[in-house]
Structures are given as C-alpha cells and as structure tokens.
C-alpha cells in the first residue's frame, strides 16, 4: 500500500536536515563596527573542527529468501523424525531426512512465533526450533562432504544462515549451490543471495564478481537488486542506478515492508549516484505511480531526504518545486510550510539570498494559512528559524559589507519580528533590526572582511556535502574514519580560487573523501568582502561511523 497524500505529516517531512536556529549578529554591528574592525590585506581563518557521523547504508529490501520445506509422508512426530535422522549412515539419506526434520522444526517455529507477542518470545521460539534445524542441516552437509551436498540441503542451509545473520555461512552455502550448476534454472536467484551475503560482509568486489556478467531482467529482481548494490559500492554509479531501476520495475515487491525498503533504496540511489533530477524523475514516477496521492509524497521525500542528505541543494529545490506542482491545491497546509522553509534553507547554501528571502516569505504565508493543521509551537519554531536566517544574513553583511545580504536580512526581520511570540526574544530582535539599519548607515565603502564566526556558520551549512562524501567511501570500507583537512583560498569576490586537502585527493579511503569534499568546495561561495585582499580558510572534518 502506497503512502497516501494526507499521511505526509509535519513531523514526517521534517526528516530532512534539521532547521538551523540561526546565529547572533556581532555585538555593535549597528554602529558600523564592521568598518572599524576590518583589517587591511589578507587574513587567515581556522574554523573549529566539525564532527560528522557517517551513516552506513546496507541493502534492506531483501533480507532473506523464502524457506523451502519438505514434509515426510504420514507426518511423523518430531521425536520419531529425530531418531530416523540420527540413525542414518548413508550421506544421501541423511541429507533427505535432515531436510525433512529441518522443515518440521521450521513449521513448529512458525506456529509458535505466530503466537509471540514480544521480541523476547520471538527470540525464544527462534532459539528453540531454528537453532536445532540449522545444526541438523550443517551436520548433514558435513557428513556428505564438500562437493557432495545436495541442492535442497544447500538451499535450506543458506536460508537458515541468513535467519541468524551468519553471512559467512550463508556465503558458503549459496556459493556451493551456484558452483554446482552455474547456468541452471535457479542460478540467477542463487547468485543474488550469494552476492547479498558478500555485500552484508562488505566484500564488495567479490559480490560484483559474482553478478557483473549476468544479464539484467525484471524477471530476476533479486539479481538486479544485488547487482545495483554491488555496482554502487564499487563506484559504478550509472550501472547501480540502471540495475536498481530494473529491479524496481518488477512486480514482485508486493510485501509492504519490502516495498518500503525498496523505496528507501531508490531515494538513496537517486541522491548518491549523482543522477540528475531530470533523469531520476521518470524512474521515480514509474515506481510511485502517476496519481497525485502517490507521486507527491515520493517527490517530497526526494527533495527533503534524498537530495537533502546528499547535500545536493539545487536538485532538492527542483524536486520540491515539482512536488508542489504535482499536488497543487491538495498539498497539505503543514507540508507546504515545511517545503517552503526547506527551499529557503537550501538556497542559503546556494548563495542566493534573494531566492532565500522569496522562499522564506512563502513559508511565512504558508504558516498564516495553516491554521489548526499546524501546532502553535511548530509555527513559532519555523518563524524563529526564518528569523535566524535573517540574523545570518545580517552577520554576513555587517562583517563583509556584501550588500547582497542587506535587503534579504531587512525583509526577513520585517516578516518575522511581529510574529515572535516571546516578548524578550521579540525585543532582542527589534534591537537587531535597528542595528542592521545603523550598519547600513555607518559602514564605509572599502571596508569589510571575512569574519571567523560568520564564515564558520556559513560553511557549516555545507557539512552535509562532506558527510555524503564520507558515506560514499564508508560503503566501501566500513572501518574508515579519521580527519580530513581542507584549506580554501578565496579572493575579494568570495570565489574559491584554490583548494588543498590533507590527505591529498586520491581514489580510496580518506584520500577519496578528501577529493570529493575538495570538488564540492570549489563550488562554494563566500560573501564579497569590501576590503581588498585574500582569505585562507582551514576546515577540519572529524569523521566516524554512526553507531547502528
């Protein structure tokens, strides 16, 4: 069942990068202090280290294969079947009786697990029945000897190992099954589970070797899905996107949890494979469906989650605009507030203050129209956040004398200050607004610098780009961590003229992360400083994987 339009609540849509609470303009900025404190010539800025926690993405749409069962005739009781299995000396018969016993134990587990009401009861049932079943199959395989285990035993054993998240054991079983019959009817299915067992161990190159020469077909969605992840984890972004779309085009994803996991993967890949919004749109539409109640939520998530967490701000704005266009007047009022605010937030990173002010104004209008669909505290939080963007622009203007920020700061103050409900906050905000006008009046031409606080706050908004770079390499090496130092050189116009990294840009591990961050940094824009000279900025990113 697809997510209905009305289910996209205020809370759900705020699953994007959290709203920034804003910064405080420098004290005394209204007296023209930016002009007084600006120093001639070049300056150097060292920003305190940013700590970034990387998310480790794993294939989740396929957790385990279906379990084959073979029930003996007459349905003997378990004790009799156990004795029959234990008495067998012939390895062929032992495997046959073992498969029957494992099937009976599995059915007992399903019966008991169906009555379980807690996680503890589920684990008790699993331990009671499935542990024995897996050991029966392992013993039967050992008795048969390497290369002589029959297909059913291997198929069941591979499935049981996955039930216990024993990926090494699963790898062994599925690989043996494929090697017995590399071109058989079930070979593609078996290869998929072999590759997935490798991927869950982060043996990415080995997983790719298992599937790379196999044809893509929607009749084999498991293989296409495994291929997508193997290609993504080994750097083939275009191949990964193509394979995932083949998998998603199959009609096999009917189970709701599985369908939801596949949707997540589509959103992850759309953002992380550098697929343009224009290229992603047809595939996203094909998966979600063209009906507004189905397509709108997918487009909103694409803009908020996919592009937001990938640090692709311009693509995020495109996706959100398309979401609003698709749903039109049916966009829930609370969703419209979130979308317009996030568009404002994204365009700060794009160095488009006029666009930011436009989206912020639309967010304020959406708050006014939201009525009881938005909680009062939520409304006030977004007003405060938009006021915070105004304060950031104030700070950038007051320190750099980049006049592009004055008008948006003035407009955002004018929009939000009357709506601030807390009297103390409103009084402070009114002082900020007065200070901004004094700065405009007193600041002299040829003054203004790149200020440590202002630049630190501005560049912190690009942290998600750095984190996305890290997460790409983390998918290839789950133990990767450490620090990357990025040094930027900017001229008076705020254009980044040079980027150096430590470690130096390379193809693997932290060198790959450094290179990726460096490429992003070349597109960043600082305020134009009123005073001639250059600015050197040192950024440090402390990278570690987030705990699961």
Image (tube, grey):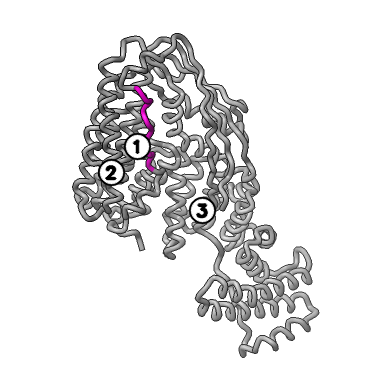
Q: Is residue 225 above or below residue 461?
A: below
Residue at image position (64%, 44%) is 479
The residue that label 3 is drawn on is 225
Q: Is residue 462 above or below residue 334?
A: above
Asked which secondary structure carries label 3, the reply is helix
- Identify the mark nearer the N-term, 2 or 3: 3
Residue at image position (78%, 84%) is 87
x and y, in percent, of residue 130 in the image: 64, 74
Dot 3 alpha-carbon crowd within 10 angstroms: few under 14, some 14 to 19, many 20 or more: many
Residue at image position (28%, 46%) is 380
* Label ID, residue 69: none
Q: Is residue 486 above or below residue 419?
A: above
* Label ID, residue 345: 1
- Identify the mark nearer the N-term, 3 or 1: 3
Q: CA distance from mark 2 to mark 3?
A: 52 Å
For the N terminus, which image quadrant?
bottom left
Q: CA distance from mark 1 to mark 2?
A: 23 Å
Question: 62 left or right of 289?
Answer: right
Asked which secondary structure carries label 2, the reply is loop
- Identify the mark nearer the N-term, 1 or 2: 1
Asked which secondary structure carries label 1, the reply is helix
The residue that label 2 is drawn on is 422
Dot 1 alpha-carbon crowd within 10 angstroms: few under 14, some 14 to 19, many 20 or more: many
Mark 3 and mark 1 in contact? Answer it, CB < 8 Å: no
Which of these two is toward me, 222 or 356? 356
Q: Nearer the viewer, mark 2 or mark 3?
A: 2
Residue at image position (75%, 63%) is 147
Residue 324 part of the magenta-drawn span: no
Residue farthest to the right, as pictured: 89
Residue 541 seen in this snapshot: yes
Q: Nearer the viewer, mark 1 or mark 2?
A: 2
Residues drawn in magenta: 19-28
């Amino acid at each position: 069942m697809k997510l209905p339009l009305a289910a996209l609540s205020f809370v759900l849509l705020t699953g994007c990068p959290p709203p920034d609470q804003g910064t405080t303009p420098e004290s005394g900025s209204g007296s023209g202090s930016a002009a007084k404190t600006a120093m001639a010539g070049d300056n150097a800025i060292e920003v305190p280290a940013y700590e970034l926690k990387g998310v480790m993405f794993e294939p989740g749409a396929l957790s385990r294969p279906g379990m084959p069962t073979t029930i003996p005739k007459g349905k003997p009781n378990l004790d009799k079947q156990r004795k029959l299995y234990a008495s067998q000396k012939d390895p062929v018969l032992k495997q046959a009786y073992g498969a029957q016993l494992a099937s009976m134990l599995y059915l007992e587990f399903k019966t008991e697990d169906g009555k379980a009401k807690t996680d503890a009861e589920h684990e008790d049932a699993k331990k009671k029945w499935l542990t024995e079943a897996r050991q029966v199959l392992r013993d039967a395989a050992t008795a048969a000897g390497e290369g002589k285990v029959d297909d059913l035993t291997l198929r069941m054993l591979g499935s049981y190992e996955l039930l216990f998240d024993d990926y090494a054991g699963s790898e062994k079983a599925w690989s043996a099954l494929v090697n017995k019959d590399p071109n058989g009817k079930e070979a593609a299915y078996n290869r998929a589970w072999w590759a997935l067992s490798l991927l869950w161990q982060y043996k990415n190159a080995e997983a790719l070797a298992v599937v790379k020469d196999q044809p893509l077909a929607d009749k084999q969605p498991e293989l296409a899905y495994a291929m997508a992840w193997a290609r993504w984890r080994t750097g083939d972004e275009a191949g990964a996107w193509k394979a995932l779309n083949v998998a998603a085009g199959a009609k096999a994803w009917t189970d709701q949890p599985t369908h939801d996991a596949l949707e997540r993967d589509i959103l992850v890949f759309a953002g992380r494979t550098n697929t343009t919004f224009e290229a992603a749109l047809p595939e996203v539409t094909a998966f979600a469906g063209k009906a507004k109640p189905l397509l709108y939520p997918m487009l909103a998530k694409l803009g908020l989650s996919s592009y937001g967490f990938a640090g692709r701000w311009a693509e995020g704005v495109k996706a959100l605009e398309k979401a609003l266009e698709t749903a039109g007047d049916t966009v829930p009022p609370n969703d419209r507030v979130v979308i317009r605010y996030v568009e404002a937030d994204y365009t700060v990173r794009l160095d488009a203050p006029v666009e930011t002010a436009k989206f912020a104004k639309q967010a304020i209008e959406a708050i006014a129209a939201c009525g009881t669909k938005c909680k009062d505290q939520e409304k006030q939080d977004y007003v405060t956040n938009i006021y915070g963007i105004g304060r950031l622009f104030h700070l950038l203007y007051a320190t750099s004398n980049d006049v592009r920020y004055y008008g948006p700061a003035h407009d955002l103050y004018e929009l939000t200050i009357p709506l601030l409900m807390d009297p103390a906050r409103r009084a402070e905000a009114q002082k900020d607004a007065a200070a901004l006008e004094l700065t405009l009046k007193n600041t002299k031409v040829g003054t203004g610098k790149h200020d440590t606080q202002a630049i630190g706050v501005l560049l912190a908004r690009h942290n998600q780009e750095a984190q996305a770079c890290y997460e790409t390499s983390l998918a290839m090496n789950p133990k990767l961590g450490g620090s990357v130092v990025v040094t930027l050189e900017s001229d008076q116009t705020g254009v980044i003229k040079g980027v150096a990294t430590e470690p130096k840009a390379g193809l693997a591990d932290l060198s790959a992360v450094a290179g990726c961050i460096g490429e992003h940094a070349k597109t960043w824009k600082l305020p134009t400083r009123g005073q001639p000279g250059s600015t050197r900025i040192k950024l440090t990113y402390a990278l570690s994987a987030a705990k699961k």
